[in-house]
């Protein structure tokens, strides 16, 4: 059971979990197993007044990529304890506002890794073999049986930009097909298998038959692949983007395809994407038979959705029940042991000097014994977790809630 200085105490069965955008039932199952039975699900994204109404009494809120959690929405969710992004990206959440309000945000950075890697591997083979254009010709009633511009991937060089969880797995799979793998990352990474690290993006572009992008959306990756970078790529090479839509200059890519400098591309993400399945998709790339276009489905497999549902929900439950914030994207990361016997107080406060001293002074003045204490800070907030004797828990909660810099304070029994 959780008690807070900011919202009424409620047992698990009375707390509301709101899951939007057709999040997999594995999330609901995990919540129910832990005793959270008040669960509302929506198949689509919500916006405006409908979204504000839906989150007003939510304890947990789960979204995917389309629901926009703006500062206004978050401020309207006075009972909200944590947000779960059931995907990799968190750009749909105002992370700074969530942090200011003391709301940790969790995501699923690893659960769809295999799904994305398999799609990219399939695209590599299809592009190098020239299958997309041959497929398009047959759909129009034509017949072009030719080996022109059709190659095996064995012996070709795959360049991976961004050598994280997805990039490394693609490298391993590509090597099994006989490809040579090179990679470039802004951070030092340990090569897996026979992959070779290159010192610069320019060096990678110059030697790769296929370039695949796996970088986050940051100011540094905005138009990372523009006219200059495409010009550096090998004539006849291919480009794959399954990372973020802003990483590739689409007009520059279209020009390179038109001139036949590039012989193909596979794009799963776009700078502007339709907001629903009934919307119209437009892009300069739709004119090219040698381009594979997919609707942001790199991680959209049933296996990935099951795993994402489990992963993110487990993080929400662990924070609610235990206070652990490991892997939160906007919050101090504090890994906590299970609390048994004692009560645990979660104190979220402004990250200014002297708060921890105030916390300890108030507990000392109340004669409250601290059995364990954990502290983490990040940017503008601090997070201190304190285990105290159960008999003194209510007194401790009231004392810490009175600290002027307090944002939120909860008591776990």
Image (tube, rainbow, N blue to C red):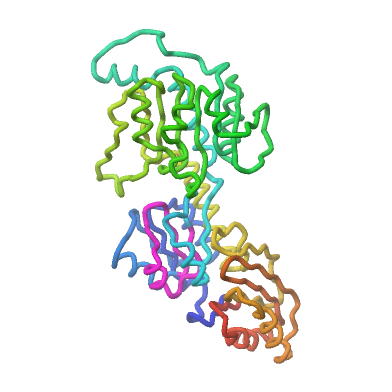
Residue at 41%, 23% (x, y): give it: 262
Quarter of the image holding residue 58?
bottom left
Image vertical order of residue 346 relative to residue 271, above or below: below
Side (left or right) of 37 relative to 42: right
Residue at 31%, 25% (x, y): give it: 288
Which of these two is toward me, 144 or 290? Answer: 290
Image vertical order of residue 83 relative to residue 131, above or below: below
- Image location of residue 344, percent across then percent down: 65, 76
Does residue 192 appear in this view?
A: yes
Q: Is residue 328 magenta?
A: no
Which of these two is toward me, 112 or 136? Answer: 136
- Image location of residue 335, percent across then percent down: 67, 62
Q: Is residue 69 magenta?
A: yes
- Quadrant containing the C terminus is bottom right
- Image location of residue 31, percent across then percent down: 51, 61
Side (left or right) of 142 relative to 223: left
Provide the residue span drawn in magenta.
59-84
- Quadrant containing the N terminus is bottom right
Residue at 33%, 70% (x, y): give it: 53
Residue at 44%, 51% (x, y): give it: 24
- Image location of residue 156, percent across then percent down: 55, 19
Quarter of the image holding residue 135?
top left
Image vertical order of residue 212 relative to residue 144, above or below: below
Residue situated furthest top in the rendering = 146
């Amino acid at each position: 059971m959780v008690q807070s200085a900011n919202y009424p105490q409620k047992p698990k069965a009375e707390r509301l979990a709101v899951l939007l955008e057709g999040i997999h039932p594995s999330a609901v199952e995990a919540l129910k197993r832990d005793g959270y039975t008040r669960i509302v699900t929506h198949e689509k994204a919500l916006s405006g007044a409908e979204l504000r109404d839906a989150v007003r009494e939510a304890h947990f809120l789960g979204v995917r990529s389309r629901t926009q959690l703006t500062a206004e929405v978050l401020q309207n969710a006075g009972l909200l304890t944590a947000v779960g992004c059931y995907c990799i990206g968190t750009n749909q959440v105002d992370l700074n506002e969530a942090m200011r309000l003391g709301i940790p945000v969790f995501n699923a950075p690893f659960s769809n890794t295999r799904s994305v890697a398999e799609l990219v591997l399939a695209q590599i083979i299809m592009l190098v073999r020239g299958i997309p254009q041959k497929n398009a010709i047959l759909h129009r009633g034509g017949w072009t049986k030719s080996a022109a511009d059709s190659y095996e991937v064995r012996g070709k060089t795959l360049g991976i930009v961004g050598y994280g969880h997805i990039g490394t797995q693609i490298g391993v799979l590509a090597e099994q097909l006989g490809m040579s793998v090179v990679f470039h990352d802004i951070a030092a990474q340990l090569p897996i298998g026979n992959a070779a690290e290159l010192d610069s993006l320019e060096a990678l572009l110059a030697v790769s038959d296929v370039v695949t992008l796996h970088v986050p959306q940051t100011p540094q990756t905005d138009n990372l692949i523009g006219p200059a970078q495409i010009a550096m790529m090998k004539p006849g090479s291919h480009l794959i983007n399954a990372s973020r839509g802003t990483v590739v200059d689409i007009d520059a890519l279209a020009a390179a395809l038109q001139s036949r400098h590039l012989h193909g591309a596979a794009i799963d993400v776009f700078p502007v994407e339709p907001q629903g399945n009934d919307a119209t998709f437009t892009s300069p790339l739709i004119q090219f038979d040698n381009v594979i276009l997919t609707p942001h489905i790199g991680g959209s497999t049933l296996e990935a959705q099951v795993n994402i549902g489990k992963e993110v929900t487990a993080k929400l439950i662990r924070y609610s029940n235990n206070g652990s914030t490991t892997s939160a994207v906007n919050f101090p990361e504090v890994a906590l042991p299970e609390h048994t016997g004692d009560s645990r107080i979660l104190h979220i406060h402004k990250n200014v000097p002297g708060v921890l001293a105030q916390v300890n002074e108030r507990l000392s003045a109340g004669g409250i014994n601290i059995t364990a204490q954990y502290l983490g800070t990040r940017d503008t907030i601090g997070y201190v977790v304190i285990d105290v004797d159960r008999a003194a828990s209510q007194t401790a909660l009231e004392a810490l809630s009175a600290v002027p810099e307090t944002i939120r304070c909860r008591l776990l029994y």
